Amino acid sequence: MSISILGHHISAPILIAPTAFHKLAHPEGEIATAKAAAASKTIMVLSFSSMSSLEEVASSCDAVRFFQLYVFKNRDVSAWLVKRAESSGYKAIVVTVDTPRLGRREADIKNKMIAPQLKNLEGLMSTKVVTDKGSGPEAFANSTFDSSFCWKDIDWLRSITKLPILVKGILTHEDATKAAEIGVDGIIVSNHGGRQLDYAPA
């Protein structure tokens, strides 16, 4: 069952996908998840929406870690996050491409969800957005994520890092072929847990 991904040997073809807000489930949050990845000899993809900073997670254990990136309208913020990931020993950048805008998550709207402050952006910008329309996470994402990000922008990402780049959110063979043609290091087939677009294939 053991395999190698980007030169990292793991115990099984199962990775920990990037998911947000782990401290809503456990007081140690993403640090506990990283320790579980290390114990299981697998890779953790740390979510951009982590409640522990990427440095805190890096110093907590020896798990192999990749970092998930959403590309911001302000590219300097994205570049800053990538450089921090490099400096902290992350082994790859996983750029999420299936969320030009956050999906209409009706439970979040009904509950008037306000996202907790993301540790990776602490001191730079608040992620606790209060809005009368939609949800806080939706308002934050739609005001900060770059919905114009496209294939040619992979060159920009490649220009700011020496880390391998994986594209997450691929669902068609056309996009998989395009990713291979432009030379990304890997793809992650994902429908964002079914939470992004209702009509995405399961």
Image: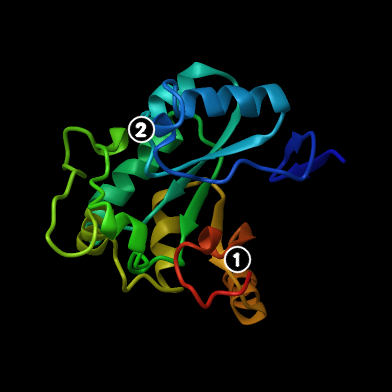
Residue at far right of view: 1
In-image side of 55 versus 122 (left or right): right
Report the disc number at residue 61. Answer: none
Q: Identify which residue is drawn at 46% across, 73% down.
A: 151
Q: Which residue is mark 2?
A: 51
Please report whichever mark, 2 or 1, sits nearer to the chain's N-terminal start.
2
Q: Can you tell which of label 2 and label 1 is closer to the viewer?
A: 2
Residue at far top of view: 60
Q: Helix, strand or loop at disc 2?
A: loop
Q: Nearer the viewer, residue 67 or 161?
A: 67
In-image side of 132 versus 60 (left or right): left
Q: Identify which residue is drawn at 21% across, 44% down.
A: 127
The answer, for residue 168, to whether it is visible in the render is yes
In the picture, the quarter occupied by the N terminus is: top right
- The percent coordinates of residue 89 (x first, y second) are 50, 30
Q: Identify which residue is drawn at 64% across, 36% down.
A: 43
- The percent coordinates of residue 160 (x first, y second) are 39, 51
Which residue type carries mark 2?
Met
Report which quarter residue 7 is drawn in.
Answer: top right
Q: Nearer the viewer, residue 197 or 39?
A: 197
Which residue type carries mark 1?
Gly
Q: Which residue is mark 1?
A: 183
Report which quarter residue 92 is drawn in.
Answer: top right
Q: Is residue 79 above or below residue 40?
A: below
The answer, for residue 72, to whether it is visible in the render is no
For the residue carrying disc 2, how many other residues have a C-alpha within 10 Å: few (<14), some (14-19), or many (20+)? many
